[in-house]
Image: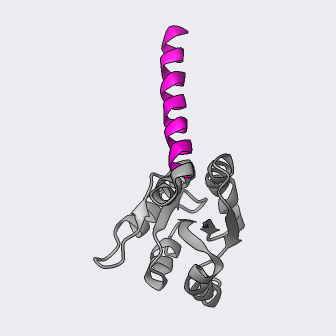
């Protein structure tokens, strides 16, 4: 089982790296690619249409501005696509990318996380994979339990 992590440009990598770190922490194989919906549309089509053959089970797609990558990718594959809206340098406070990903037409769903929330996208990918893999599911349960312990410990330290 592999997760595809794609982004519209290299400038998105620092944000998308957070998803990669989550996948690493759960020992989930992944691939990382720059796939621009606007500058490399043919590559985007090829990437999406061949993802299943490469063993990809979930795609995390991050983009800023006119963020068409997640939606266009979702239109080209039946795999779950998780969209990460990214606040770019020419962004309207991130609203352009949020709405581009969030407001998909019926029939082409994209799961959308919060602005710059690639970590949550990674965790959502882990949750999706855990449905079919008991080891991943157990690791996710342990992760959640550890989060709870950390919060309770923080309360003791106040």
What range of the chain is rendered magenta? 136-158
Q: Residue furthest front?
A: 134
> Is residue 53 positioned above or below 66 on the image?
below
> Is residue 21 positioned above or below 81 on the image?
above
Q: Is residue 25 visible?
A: yes
Residue 70, how many percent across, how many down? 49, 72
Q: Quadrant of the image for the N terminus? A: bottom right
Residue 113, how many percent across, how many down? 44, 55
Task: Please name the residue shown 55% across and 51% down the image.
Answer: 136
Left or right of 16 in this view: 127: left
Decide which of 60, 11 is in the foreground and name it: 60
Residue 58, how many percent across, how many down? 53, 67
Decide which of 99, 153 is in the foreground and name it: 153
User: Within the image, what quadrant is residue 64 found in?
Assistant: bottom right
Left or right of 139 in this view: 80: left
Left or right of 114 in this view: 24: right
């Amino acid at each position: 089982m592999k997760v595809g992590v794609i982004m519209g440009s290299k400038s998105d990598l620092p944000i998308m790296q957070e998803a990669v770190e989550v996948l690493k922490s759960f020992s989930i194989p992944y691939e990382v690619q720059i796939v621009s919906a606007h500058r490399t549309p043919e590559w985007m089509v090829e990437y999406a249409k061949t993802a299943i053959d490469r063993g990809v089970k979930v795609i995390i797609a991050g983009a800023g501005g006119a963020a068409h990558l997640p939606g266009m990718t979702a239109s080209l594959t039946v795999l779950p696509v998780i969209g990460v809206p990214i606040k770019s340098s020419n962004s309207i406070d991130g609203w352009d990318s949020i709405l581009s990903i969030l407001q998909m037409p019926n029939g082409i769903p994209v799961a959308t996380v919060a602005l710059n929330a690639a970590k949550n996208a990674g965790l959502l990918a882990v949750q999706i994979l855990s449905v079919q893999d008991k080891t991943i599911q157990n690791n996710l349960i342990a992760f959640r339990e550890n989060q709870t312990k950390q919060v309770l410990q923080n309360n003791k330290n106040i």
